[in-house]
Image: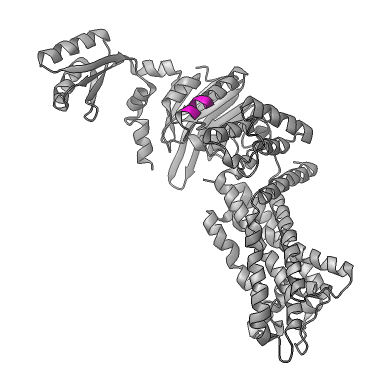
Amino acid sequence: MNVTKMFSDAGVVTWRNVMNVRRNPEWLLGATAFPIMFVLMFAYVFGGAIGGPGADGGEYREFLIAGIFAQTVAFNSSYTVIGFASDLQKGIIDRFRALPMSRLAVILGRTTADQVLSVVVLVVMSICGLLIGWRIRGSVVDAVLGYLMILLFAFALSWVGAYIGLISRSVEVANSAGLIWMFPLTFISSAFVPQESLPGVLGSIADWNPFTAAVNATRDLFGNSSPAGWPEPSGWPAENAALYAVLSCVVIIAIFAPLATAQYRKVASK
Amino acid sequence: MSGINGQAAVSARGLAKSYGSTRALDGVDLDVQPGRVLGLLGPNGAGKTTTVRILTTLLKPDAGTAVVAGHDVVAEPDAVRRSIGLSGQYAAVDENLTGFENLYLVGRLYGKKKAAARTRARELLTRFQLEEAADRPSKGYSGGMRRRLDLAGALVAEPAVVILDEPTTGLDPRGRIEMWEVIKELVADGTTVLLTTQYLEEADHLADSIVVIDKGKVIARGTADELKSQIGGERLELVVSEPAELVAAADVLGQVGVGEPAVDEHTRRADVLVDTGPKALVEALRLLDARGVVVQDVALHRPTLDDVFLSLTGHATTQAEEVSR
């Protein structure tokens, strides 16, 4: 199986997955309602308490957005999980497996198509952010890099999602399995609170959580800072957030791409 | 049966596959000659789908070999995939894509260029009478239309061998007859077909030769006629006017026939295999008349494949299906 055919197959599979999404526009409601509620809840319910004294919450809202973006695309990896589980159940994977096509392309086509979703969701979330007072304070180039950082992280998680989807025995299992690990991943981090405020072990986990690095790097590229008086995160991962985030993504893909491909080889839909 | 033939389009020897302690396949041999149709017949759970999955490279056998279109399924899976078309019992069409898009997708994945994939998709949509529905999402198709689309998908690359896994399971009678017509046309074009079915009538109708499997083993093989003559004779069937008369009727049938007569109280029907044809019929009527049993209907016919199956396995296909559920 040559490389050209692999990319051509992946392109065709991406097209198929994007068409599937376009024919079911309801997904957009599901994909954005949740993060928008998170924005409102954190900005206006917890924001006053978390954001520190004296502030009107504007600083916290600006701090919050990079975390919400990253959390939103992280949760999107559950679409990868469900997409695979449902293709397995419907026999689509069997059809693909009986075709003279690249195995990797089936997964790459899915993880790529899911980034199209992430882009659409990021547009909606950016508008939501602008409405509550978030602004990009850095240069255009940095802003673009910030969005790319988030998309790279989403792409990496999508490979984890692909593996989970392919080991799930049903769409129902996939539904829970795809979401459950999202909560510790996204909350034990710097997305919503200063990571320095987390106690003991949780603090160390948050420091080394690739999610924290992705959030910090993006926040930095957007030129958004922490509310005044918050402790600045320290340590190697915090001081090299962008580098650490990118390295983490590469490592995640390097681990889960072969795992998912091997699982794809093994799966039988019944 | 020209079983030992190097030229066979599909040839399997000693296929075995176990799931845990269950032996799904226990040494299956089969051959399909080029341009012919082999019917793989058996109840649910007999091992038909496992056989298909091995022949289409979806599953590796624990033991045995299979060569499809000249390529070993284990050693050269990609070459096999290029030469076959698979249409499954689940009609694996993407319901969010239109009929056209489904076929275009498959064409592209077989390695066709965009224009060629488009042309081929339109050709097949026309051939399978899906032209009008071509640009609607296949979600709205009837069961029969989906099956036709799935079959069209199997034919995109004009494969030398087409494998149909229970092509009519779940279709209504009209859908089934339409599907049969389509399969017959395919065969007329010279394509080699291996089809699995649990419908004896379907194997009888479509297949040049039949392999009967049950519990992972081949229990009979031959043409439909050969299988029918294997159990010999004919079936004498009669309907009496009162259920109470069935005992006498069964008794009489037992005397003129071979083997145990079958009785169905619900339809007041009794039948038995006979090897003396009309003579047995006359004898049975004479005996029944002497015992004062009123016969409403009587018939003598050649055994169906159902009879063959019953005599080979000791259970009917439909019963087997219920048990396995």
Instruction: Give B248 or B138, whichever is nearer the viewer.
Output: B138
Residue A139 on the magenta segment: no
Q: Quadrant of residue A214?
A: bottom right
Q: Is residue B32 left or right of residue B267?
A: right
Above or below B157: residue A261: below
Where's residue B262, x and y in %?
24, 25
Residue ID at (73%, 92%): A54
Instruction: Give A24 or A119, whichever is nearer the viewer.
Output: A24
Above or below A218: residue B177: above
Farthest front residue in view? A131
Q: Quadrant of residue B118?
A: top right
Where's residue B158, x and y in %?
67, 27
Q: Which residues are magenta?
A: B174-179
Where's residue B145, x and y in %?
56, 33
The reply to whether residue A183 is visible in this rendering is yes
Q: Is residue B295 left or right of residue B209?
A: left
Where's residue A202, x and y in %?
64, 81
Above or below A21: residue B114: above
Residue B176 on the magenta segment: yes
Tell me the quarter of the image containing the C terminus of chain B.
Answer: top left
> What secondary structure is the magenta-colored segment mainly?
helix
Q: Quadrant of residue B265?
A: top left
Above or below A145: residue B272: above
The reply to whether residue A267 is visible in this rendering is no
